[in-house]
Amino acid sequence: ADADGLAETFLPSVVKLIATKHTELKRLVYIFLVRHAEAKPDDALMAVNEIQKGLQDANNAQTRVLSVRVLSSIRVQDIVPITFVVIKNTVFDPNPVVRKAAVLGLAKLHAFNREMKEDLFEILTKVLDSEPSPSVLGSACEVFHSLCPENLDVIHWSYRKLCKLLVDMDE
């Protein structure tokens, strides 16, 4: 408990490092932030704007993936609406790796806030209907299983496509 208290003391200073251009340092800051955000939600909120800037980097899909993963991993209630909008937009990103991170973010958001099930379900349905990438569809099936496994009528329209792409899915 003492180590956590000490870490929380440094959270505001660490959050300031989030603007760095050094990718490895940024990753470490993100890990620290996700680990300690619940204890210091106000400090976590300070970081959201900088994390969202990573979503605008059209030339670097890994930066966008990292931003989606971090936002969907921060367990602070005030960030949930922002994370929802980010996921809603990034499930249609041009890069399949970013879309996969966004789809997996649906499950994280659902685990943290069960009241959003209907909204998350709506996004998942659109992904299942329109996604061409087997990798993203594999993740969508995984999220479907955790979000609404009893609701098989959702995959009715996508069933043949899912069966055809099943061999290529990696989840």
Image: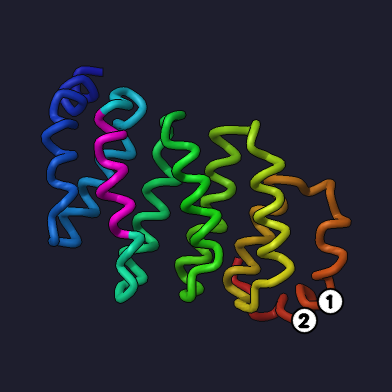
Q: Position of residue 129 (x, y in %)?
A: 74, 68
Amino acid type, label 2: Lys
Q: Position of residue 153 (x, y in %)?
A: 88, 56
Q: Quadrant of residue 6?
A: top left
Residue ID for mark 1: 160
Determine whether the residue tagged by mark 1 lies in a helix, strand or loop: helix
Taking depth in this image into account, of 77 and 11 the one nearest to the observer is: 77
Amino acid type, label 1: Arg
Left or right of 52 in this view: 2 = left
Mark 1 to mark 2: distance in Å? 6 Å
Q: Pointer 1 and pointer 2: residues touching (CB < 8 Å)?
A: yes
Give, as a single range, the part of the protein colored magenta: 43-54
Q: Position of residue 75 (x, y in %)?
A: 43, 33
Left or right of 36 in this view: 153 = right
In the rendered view, tell whether residue 130 sits above or below residue 84: below
Residue ID for mark 2: 164
